[in-house]
Image (spheres, grey):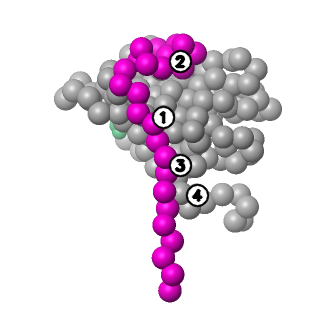
Amino acid sequence: MKEIKIESKLYVFDSLSELPNEVRSLMEKAVEARDKAYAPYSKFNVGAALILDNDEVITGNNQENASYPSGLCAERTAIYYAGSQFPDAKVLRMAISATSKNKPTVDPIPPCGACRQAIAEYEIKQETPIEIYFMGEIGKIVKSNSLSNLLPLVFDKNLL
Ligand code: THU
């Protein structure tokens, strides 16, 4: 038996003003998208904005459904749209912001496991890292240089 140690490096920015301009403007687009989310059941609004290597910016937000599992997260709404409209473009980075009507979201909100798996698919397909930035409603922002830092031991197409 041997031990395997898994480590990830993440970076924390104190506020939006600490972000490089292009990242701040992407996060602002995620916030705009967040405020248009359709989340009447959870009251938890999430917005995602991503930028492609052709300079297109795509946004998405969570879309809920009375049949709860039929809803979709913001990150997948955005990345599936990008994949469907620009199949040959690479995703450079994604910004995510979430807010709850039930309690203040002061901590950065990371993407859920299913969204990590979905984003990983595109990172592996395009063979270049996707930067991920995530935030709560406002406040600290966490940066990962690659989705892979958020999903060690990914299940990917090379295993099929
Ligand atoms: N949600 C997202 O949009 N992204 C995530 O990464 C986590 C959860 C949505 C799904 C649901 O509409 C609400 O947040 C509560 O789970």
Name the one closer to the observer, 93 or 45: 93
**Location of residue 18 in the rendering, given as x and y in whole percent from the top left corner:** 43, 19
- SS category of the residue bearing label 4: loop
**Residue occupied by mark 4:** 154
* Residue 149, numbered circle: 3
Task: Confirm if mark 4 falls within 8 A of ligand 1.
Answer: no
Q: Which residue type carries mark 4?
A: Val
Circles 4 and 1 in contact, beta carbons < 8 Å? no
- Distance from label 4 to label 2 (Cα)? 29 Å
Farthest residue to the right: give it: 88
Mark nearer the N terminus (4 vs 2): 2
Disc number lying in front (3 or 4): 3
The part of the image, by quadrant, that contains residue 21 is: top right
Circles 2 and 1 in contact, beta carbons < 8 Å? no
Q: Quadrant of ligand 1?
A: top left
Q: Residue at x 48, y 66 (%)?
A: 5
Q: Residue at x 62, y 37 (%)?
A: 130
Q: Which residue type carries mark 3?
A: Asn
Task: Confirm if mark 3 falls within 8 A of ligand 1.
Answer: no
**Residue occupied by mark 2:** 20
Look at the picture and state if 39 lies above or below 122: above
Mark nearer the N terminus (4 vs 1): 1
**Location of residue 16 in the rendering, given as x and y in whole percent from the top left corner:** 41, 18
- Distance from label 4 to label 1 (Cα)? 19 Å
**Location of residue 28 in the rendering, given as x and y in whole percent from the top left corner:** 46, 14
Decide: few, some or many residues near mark 1? Use Cα within 10 Å; few <14, some 14-19, many ≥20.
many
- Distance from label 2 to label 1 (Cα)? 12 Å
Whether residue 54 is visible here, answered yes or no, is yes
Circles 3 and 4 in contact, beta carbons < 8 Å? no
- SS category of the residue bearing label 2: loop
Q: Which residues are magenta?
A: 1-28
Task: Confirm if mark 1 falls within 8 A of ligand 1.
Answer: no
